[in-house]
Image: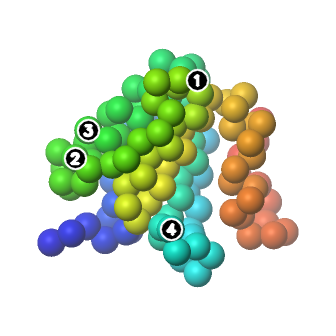
Amino acid sequence: MPATSETLLDRIIASLEDDKAEDIVPIPLKGKSSMADHMVVCSGRSSRQVAAISENLTDRLKQDLGILCKTEGKDQGDWVLIDAGDVIVHVFRPEVRDFYQLEKMWMTPGAPSPHTA
């Protein structure tokens, strides 16, 4: 039985927490976008940590849930996009995350930003 998007989201957040990702922000996309049900934005302290967080997450999802993820940007380590189907994950170095402010595009207008510098 395939994992629900909520089960997948929980597993992704657990993996990110295990690898000490910082400022983990889940963003619900249902009704906002047809590309996925959820987006998760987080940071790693260095290019090496960003790459390790991303690699560990894709390995765990493959092992635990049989999900093969598509990734972009792992070689540079500034911003890695992981497409896990119902959940899209963005892992940034803090400076790159601050520059793009991706979560601000998807948050509800008027809601306080969960990400602080």
Under mark 4, the amino acid is Met
| Whether label 1 touches label 3, CB < 8 Å | no
> Which residue corresponds to the image point at 50% horizontal and 33% vertical from the top-left?
73
> Which residue corresponds to the image point at 70% horizontal and 50% vertical from the top-left?
102
Q: Residues within 10 Å of mark 4 (few under 14, many from 20)?
A: some
- Nearest-to-viewer mark from 1 and 4: 4
Under mark 3, the amino acid is Asp
Specify which label sits upstream in the sequence, 1 or 3: 1
Q: Which residue is mark 2?
A: 62
**Local SS, label 3:** helix
**Local SS, label 2:** helix
Residue 71 can be seen in this image: yes
Q: Which residue is mark 1?
A: 45
Q: Residues within 10 Å of mark 3 (few under 14, many from 20)?
A: some
Q: Which residue is mark 4?
A: 35
Under mark 1, the amino acid is Arg
Specify which label sits upstream in the sequence, 1 or 4: 4
Question: Number of marks in the image?
Answer: 4
Specify which label sits upstream in the sequence, 3 or 4: 4
| Whether label 3 touches label 2, CB < 8 Å | yes
Q: Which residue is mark 3?
A: 59
Specify which label sits upstream in the sequence, 2 or 1: 1
- Nearest-to-viewer mark from 2 and 1: 2
Q: Residues within 10 Å of mark 2 (few under 14, many from 20)?
A: some
